[in-house]
Image (cartoon, rainbow, N blue to C red):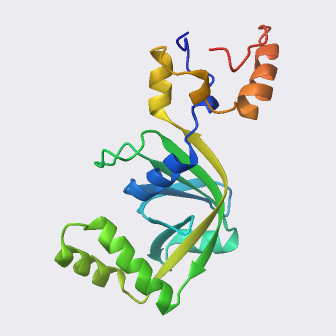
Amino acid sequence: MAAHDHEVVSIYGHSEEQKHELMTRAPECVLMWATKDGWPVGVVHSFVWRDDKIWITFSSHRHRAAAIRRDNRVSVTVSGAPSQDPKCPRGAVTVKGKGTFHDDDETKKWFYRALANKVSPESKQGEDDFYNLLNSPLRTILEVVPEKWISFDAEKSAKDRAGLLSDDEKTPPLSSDVVRMKKEREIRGMEPRNPNDQ
């Protein structure tokens, strides 16, 4: 049976392999943090996925540097939509994690080279120019270690709407679609809904 609405979506999670491919091939991410007065803020960054961690760089005098040093709980969203790579999975992931800053020369050397290569993979001159641009005295590097993943595979969702997604391809529904949806339907006087029955 084809999905008849878009309320139950946690069943469209990526596999671990898909997550790795998305994190490797997607060109940009959105880094999110909280300001001192509690406002959530997000900025788009190029990034590197290495050793199952997210690596991002910006200047030390940016407000985000002070905010994350004060509270290192951050989120990072990565979407496959901007990618021109046909092997990049569709959909998006959001990572909740904690950030650690690095200012040592060893980390700067490998990270700046990796990021420059990702930004200019087909031009050694472009890679070198970007490396030199990054290598400035006020720049710092943020390492984000994932603690929780929120994943949405757009291709699975499209297949389900077309009635082509098998139950074996679906991921187990999360608490939002099991517990919270049930409570919300009760508040509205609606019958319970099985999240596995689209």
**Which residue lies at the image location 33% right of the left edge and 66% below the top edge?**
118
- Image quarter hosting the N terminus: top right
192 vs 21, left or right, is: right
**Which residue lies at the image location 59% right of the left edge and 67% below the top edge?**
144
84 vs 75, left or right, is: left
Q: Quadrant of residue 8?
A: top right
- Out of 115 and 135, give the one closest to the viewer: 115
- Image quarter hosting the C terminus: top right
Q: Is residue 159 above or below residue 119?
A: above
195 vs 56, left or right, is: right
Give coordinates of residue 60: x percent, y percent.
Answer: 50, 80
Give coordinates of residue 171: x percent, y percent.
Answer: 63, 33
**Which residue lies at the image location 70% right of the left edge and 20% below the top edge?**
195
Give coordinates of residue 106: x percent, y percent.
Answer: 48, 90
Q: How many marks?
A: 0
Q: Is residue 10 above or below residue 21?
A: above
Q: Residue furthest front?
A: 168
Give coordinates of residue 5: x percent, y percent.
Answer: 56, 15
**Which residue lies at the image location 50% right of the left edge and 54% below the top edge?**
20
- Out of 37 and 12, give the one closest to the viewer: 12
